[in-house]
Image: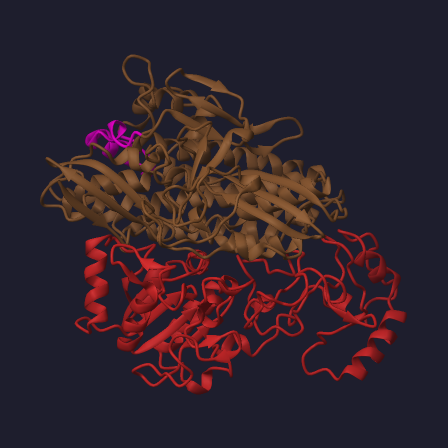
Amino acid sequence: MNLLWLQAGGCGGCTLSLLGADARDLLRQLEDVGIRVLFHPALSEASGPEALAILEDAASGKVPVDILCVEGAVLRGPNGSGRFHILAGTGIPMLDWVQRLAGQARHVFAIGSCTAFGGVPAAGENSTDACGLQFEGDEKGGILGAEWQSAAGLPVVNVAGCPTHPGWVVDSLMALALGQLQARDLDALQRPRFYSDQLVHHGCPRNEFYEFKASAHKPSELGCLMENLGCKGTQAHADCNTRVWNGVGSCLRGGYPCISCTEPSFEEPGHPFMETPKVAGIPIGLPSDMPKAWFVALAALSKSATPKRVRENAAADHPVVMPAIRKTGLK
Amino acid sequence: MSKLVLGPFNRVEGDLEVSLEVNDGTVHSARVNAPLYRGFEPMLLGKAPLDALAIVPRICGICSVAQSAAAASALAEAMGLTPPPNGRLARNLIQAGENLADHLTHFYLFFMPDFARAAYAAKPWFAETEGRFKAQTGRATAEMLPARAGFMRLQGYLAGKWPHTMALQPGGTTRAVLAAEKIRLYAVLREFRAWLESTLFGDALETVAALDSADALRAWAAGRQADFPRFLALADDLGLQQVGRAGNLFLSVGAYPGSVGSLFPAGVWDGAKGRRAELDTARIVEDLSHAWLAGDAPQAPAQGQTRPLLEKEDAYTWCKAPRYGGQVAEVGALARQLVAGQPLAQDLVRNGQGKSAGGNVTARIVARMLEIAALIPAMENWVQQLAPGEPFCAHGELPDAAIGVGLTEAARGSLGHWLTVKHGAIAGYQIIAPTTWNFSPRDATGTPGPLEQALVGLPIPKDEAAPVLVQHVVRSFDPCMVCTVH
């Protein structure tokens, strides 16, 4: 399968993230399932006229494109012209290139949240009119349209994340090559369910603090970041804390909140990123699937039951009270 | 006079188009176009100031931490905060980690594959070079990526993830290192050192860092079986020390603060005089004359604005033209090492008469390698200085009105953020990134930017559609185009 990768109005961070994959040999791993990189802006030798020839052959159908990966939001402005992003050497907006190539590709992958939904380039007043391939925020549409399907009959596969995790890209590509990525394997936002059927909360190392609502108030404190510091891990779909990043990390493990970067419109949360919006002292964004009354009742109860160790450690940047050593043996 | 337009320029970060006017087989003049505009500066206006820490890393996937550090520093100045020693050390480690990974990515993925091009097929060194460095298939890529990924565990421990961490805060970092992690961090660094010493250098890092002249470098490299010496042999054969000269002025804002001073100091190196001067940031302005942006007079960044204007005579890029005291300046690892007084770097930019021959392809690559060799020992030292149990982050309030400037060195050079806060919100945010300096267009006096100067005079063979020498010169700067315009 030929893979062609384009970088649109993004930051290139999903490619850089991909290079941190834990594969012993990333390109051979893809080759092993039959994926050949026809063109990638950071990896291919071809540059200038040689690169253009590859893109032109792909866009005209002369060379088949089995997988088109687009990384970065598509900029439609100013005034629908797409001129905020001209593909270098062509004089033609990236908007037009993406549309032409998507029309030829058997499968189209949106790599990262800006390609999927618009993401950070669409923040603020969105002066460049940035949007995703098949979504604008959580509204279906984008530059390809709500009903669009690739030649193979799938909608755009949204490998969302900012950046996206290298494993999400590699496993999505491998699943496709192995015949294990079909419409039923995508969620309602067209993200691969192998990672989007989980919550960032799952496997969070701050779980004990969450259980007791023992909360951090300031950056670097060990407590749960949900109540005060804007964490959306109990709502955001991703397996960050079970898969982990760069071998050992995640946003929560790094001490800062989940900003739900796999979700549409995460870039405009409607509140400062590191502050939890509340009504009458209760966070607006409750954990997914949790009835509000129960949450309030359980939070009140667990707060009053918080052990000293958990309460004091929550407000420190390293454990100050250690778990008791039981004298009776563990039962 | 014929015209050659090169784009999409691959194996650089982001979008780049280079237009050459060719006369009698040599480059007569060059124009550099950054063809992507996303508008991060106007995007930040009106937002809560600390939101910059979520937004600005996402300007760039390869300089993400540097952007984050510049924002954190600007906010720290606005809040009157100084990170505690642990916070300073952790930030240094996170930034050095990104910069080293970037140097490695540049060398192996972006720069070396050009020597494996068919244009060099007749060279005696071609077969070996192709086997080792050919894009996608070369053995070096397959060896370097896992080594790099292993090194990036440092980011996993200290920053949660890379790129796009929010671990860097105005008062330090969000992740206090515990005793167990201090040991793991040391192990990660030692493992990476071993790989660098065997594969990249073929010698101890300390030996490489102590090389003090071009002659010493040549003697050291002769016959050595490792990737950096392999580059030096190719560079000598192709005369790359003679190509790619830009201006004589080199600038660094300084990097890796210690309890006193910085590992790499701030300053300006005047190659013509062979002299270092203090950096005066008040002399930095941005000229808009050839950018698709509204405004005529050059702007001091603290007062700068960014308003797109596509219909503009003489404009050919989205990139502004930063100037220092009206002069073009080159930034990057070479500039940092020249300002720091590194003797080998200084020797490599001299000509036979002891005067400056300016930056060149070889010197830019060597300076990155010297930084790798110098930084790993420094990082090992910083890890040992971490004091688990002591604070990593200072806390404070942001005033309703404040200004702050954040200056730092990204892998590819000087980065500055100029922040104005009014009524508790961002009222001004201007960014000058490394490649904004290096790939700037002409200014109002018609003076071309550093790359535009570096390309003039290069031979353009008739049979090369994308002349490989042009590619060496362009990539020697390790451009980051997504930062350039932001």
Find residue B234 and report its image quarter.
top left
Where is residue B350, by image quadrant? top left
Compared to A158, does B346 lie above or below?
above
Residue drawn at (21%, 39%) of the image: B469
Q: Is residue B232 magenta?
A: yes
- Chain letter for red? A
Q: Is residue B37 left or right of residue A44?
A: right
The image shows residue A122, relative to residue A145, as above or below, that is above
Q: Is residue B350 left or right of residue B97?
A: left
Tell which of A284 and B368 is nearer to you: A284
- Judge left or right: residue B247 versus residue B151: left
Instruction: Please indicate, yes or no, whether residue B264 appears anywhere in the rendered image.
Output: no
Q: Position of residue B293 (x, y in %)?
A: 42, 49
Which segment did they paint magenta? B223-245
Any idea which chain is the brown one in this picture?
B
Image quadrant holding the N terminus of chain A, namely: bottom left
Extreme-right residue of the structure: A304
Indicate whether residue B54 is drawn in magenta. no
Q: Residue at x 45, y 45 (%)?
A: B295
Viewport quadrant of the C terminus of chain A: bottom right
Q: Position of residue A270 (x, y in %)?
A: 65, 67
**Closer to the camera in the image, B268 or A96:** A96
Magenta: main secondary structure equals helix
